[in-house]
Image: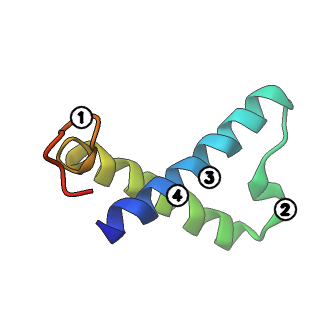
Amino acid sequence: MKMHKIAFILLIIGGINWGLTGVINGWNLANYVGSTLAMVIYILVGVSAIFEIFSHKGLCRNCNPQGSM
């Protein structure tokens, strides 16, 4: 359950970054942090997405009323 919350927060960060990149052309959070840190953040967001793809249905109250949350 803790991993689900961490993954969810990282997905929110990634989603906000993509939204801002689309709305404000060329704006990207990665421009304001070092390239190594940006790469780590991108990897964590990607791993979070993969984790959520495989675990979301079992953990989400809306998708599974008997879920563990």
Label 2: how many residues lie within 10 Å, few (<14), some (14-19) or many (20+)?
Answer: few
Helix, strand or loop under label 4: helix
Helix, strand or loop under label 1: loop
Along the line of sight, the residue nearer the viewer: 37 or 64: 64
**Could you tell which of marks 1 and 4 lies nearer the N-terminus?**
4
Q: CA distance from mark 4 to mark 3?
A: 6 Å
**Could you tell which of marks 2 and 3 lies nearer the N-terminus?**
3
Q: Nearer the viewer, mark 1 or mark 2?
A: 1
| Figure quadrant of the N terminus | bottom left
* Three-letter code, disc 1: Cys
Residue 16 placement: quadrant: top right
Q: Residue at x 30, y 54 (%)?
A: 51
As drawn, the label of residue 13 is: 3
Tell whether label 2 touches label 1 (CB within 8 Å): no
Helix, strand or loop under label 2: helix
Q: CA distance from mark 1 to mark 2?
A: 36 Å
Position of residue 61 measured from the top left corner of the image (x, y, whole percent): 27, 43
- Residue corresponding to mark 2: 32
Q: Nearer the viewer, mark 1 or mark 4?
A: 1
Residue 30 placement: quadrant: bottom right
Position of 17 with respect to 62 (left or right) is: right
* Three-letter code, disc 3: Ile
Label 3: how many residues lie within 10 Å, few (<14), some (14-19) or many (20+)?
Answer: some
As drawn, the label of residue 63 is: 1
- Residue corresponding to mark 4: 9
* Three-letter code, disc 2: Tyr
Position of residue 11 measured from the top left corner of the image (x, y, whole percent): 51, 50
Tell whether label 3 touches label 4 (CB within 8 Å): yes
Q: Nearer the viewer, mark 2 or mark 3?
A: 3
Q: CA distance from mark 1 to mark 3?
A: 22 Å
Label 1: how many residues lie within 10 Å, few (<14), some (14-19) or many (20+)?
Answer: few
